[in-house]
Amino acid sequence: MSSALTENRVYFAKLAYGLILDCGCGFGLYAKILKKRGRVVGADINKNSLINVPYQHKVLCSITNLPFKTDAFDFAWTCAVIEHVKENCILEVIRTGKHAIFLTPNKNSPLELIRKLMGKKGTWETPDHERLYTVSELKKYGKVFGDSCGLPKRSLWIMLLPNRLWLFLPRLSHSIILYSDKKKLKVA
């Protein structure tokens, strides 16, 4: 099992139902879980990813301009994608699904701030990360939860705080999870 499949991420993947969009599906890390929850359409900008992803329905497209009708999906799943896109593509994903989940690095995680104070480059500051988000930025789109993904397995943070506790500590978390319910959303 991949270290990206944390208990909290699996919990949110299991909320998916009905017609599901796996937006930026890559090689299908969550495919096994999502396929048990409903019919899944994989969407990615990388043709090679789509060739290998285990979905029957696949669409080659950009997350900034999804070729789907508004509310075409019951659930949109977007894991480790939005940080790779320069433009804010959150509303575009939310437009396509009645519910949406986003998993992304926390720009202001304490670990990142400590690294910067030590004069080191942040772990999330990589050439392929175009845009990083904070808890405050994501709150306008829905409820934000925390996740420990990205933290060293034997770090003090992981030893002191059980996985489920991270859900309630998004500002302290290394990764963050945005849950957007269109019925409660004021922006869309």
Image: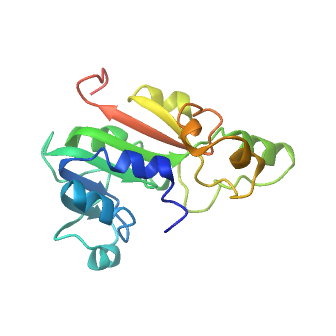
| Residue 82 seen in this snapshot | no
Residue 25 shown left or right of residue 108 in the figure: left
Q: Quadrant of residue 31?
A: bottom left
Closest to the observer: 33 or 84? 33
Q: How many marks?
A: 0
| Residue 19 seen in this snapshot | yes
Relative to 39, residue 26 above or below: below
Residue 134, image x and y in percent?
Answer: 56, 35
Residue 97, image x and y in percent?
Answer: 22, 41
Q: Image point 60% across, 32% down: which residue?
A: 169
Residue 5, image x and y in percent?
Answer: 48, 59
Colour scheme employed for the rendering of this structure: rainbow
Q: Image point 84% across, 42% down: which residue?
A: 117
Q: Image point 28% across, 22% down: which residue?
A: 184
Q: Quadrant of residue 106?
A: top right
* Quadrant into which the C terminus falls: top left
